[in-house]
Image (tube, helix red, strand yellow):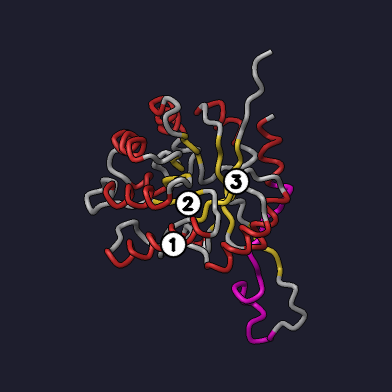
Amino acid sequence: MGKEEKYIIEIATSDFVTTKAAVEGGADRVELCANLAEGGITPSFGTIKQCRETFPVLLYPIIRPRGGDFLYTDEEFSIMLQDVKLCKELGCDGVVIGMLNRDGSLDLKRSARLVEAAYPLGVTYHRAFDRCLDPFEALEQLVEIGCERILTSGQMPAVPEGAELVAELNKRAEERIIIMPGSGLRKENIKWLAEKTGCREFHSSLRGKEASKMEFIHPGFSGSAESYMNNAIDPGEVRALRESLA
């Protein structure tokens, strides 16, 4: 009998309620975000603090001052640096970062400053990696500056289409850095991805919606999903990810 495989399930959440659901479902780690519709931006101080005080799960807030691209001004970098320090003060386990230069190379100098500011917290490099020019050069650079993992869809919009590159990245990493597939990862494909890539950590947002519990629905906004639908995660779907790996 070989050693039982240890898989890590990370869930991206968008607020306190979805974080609670992810924890109930057995997530090993949470990437705490706001506004997942834009790919996730840094959550509020209050959200980070409340989640840290409430949940024992590994907590990694994303450090991203806005949606859009990953080319940041000096002022935006200053915000990111302050948010990293705040996460450290609040007792988070790590942070999630990513920055690019105009030419598609990693913004390595400023990324290294964020890693240094976060220490001894862990650092995940997010899917800015999927927009970089040379993923294999970027992998070596991220090892060099001390990132612990790369979240990647294999430079494609969804990871099933990028699985070949993810597998090659995982091979090249040689356990110096963790390669974590994400984007479009579901219970239906997680086992296939594990076998295809050899990866042991997996990332999913499992984004859903649920109807508001409001009793009064204003007739002028009765058809407005924005007004009367809330972000939701089904804890059963989180459990199903792990069960699908069995």
In-front residue for pair 197/221: 197
Rendered residue at 43%/51% (across/down): 118
SS for tag 1?
Answer: helix
Answer with left or right where residue 239 lies relative to residue 106: right
* Mark 1 burial class by Cα count in 10 Å: few <14, some 14-19, many 20+: many
Q: Residue furthest right?
A: 215
Name which of mark 1 and mark 2 comes first in the sequence. 1
Q: Which residue is mark 1?
A: 83
Q: Point out residue 31 in the picture as x, y percentages from the top left corner.
A: 54, 52
Answer with left or right where residue 120 lies relative to residue 218: left
Residue 95 image label: 2
Q: Which residue is mark 3?
A: 29
* Mark 3 burial class by Cα count in 10 Å: few <14, some 14-19, many 20+: many
Q: Is residue 231 magenta?
A: yes
Q: Which residues are magenta?
A: 218-237
From the viewer's perspective, is residue 129 above or below residue 21? above
Rendered residue at 33%/65% (across/down): 76
Viewer-nearest of discs 1 and 3: 1
Name which of mark 1 and mark 3 comes first in the sequence. 3
Q: Is residue 221 magenta?
A: yes
Q: CA distance from mark 1 to mark 2?
A: 9 Å
Q: Point out residue 243 in the picture as x, y percentages from the top left corner.
A: 71, 35
Three-letter amino acid code of the residue under disc 2:
Val
Rendered residue at 57%/46% (across/down): 204
Quick check: marks 1 and 2 in contact, CB under 8 Å?
yes
SS for tag 3?
Answer: strand
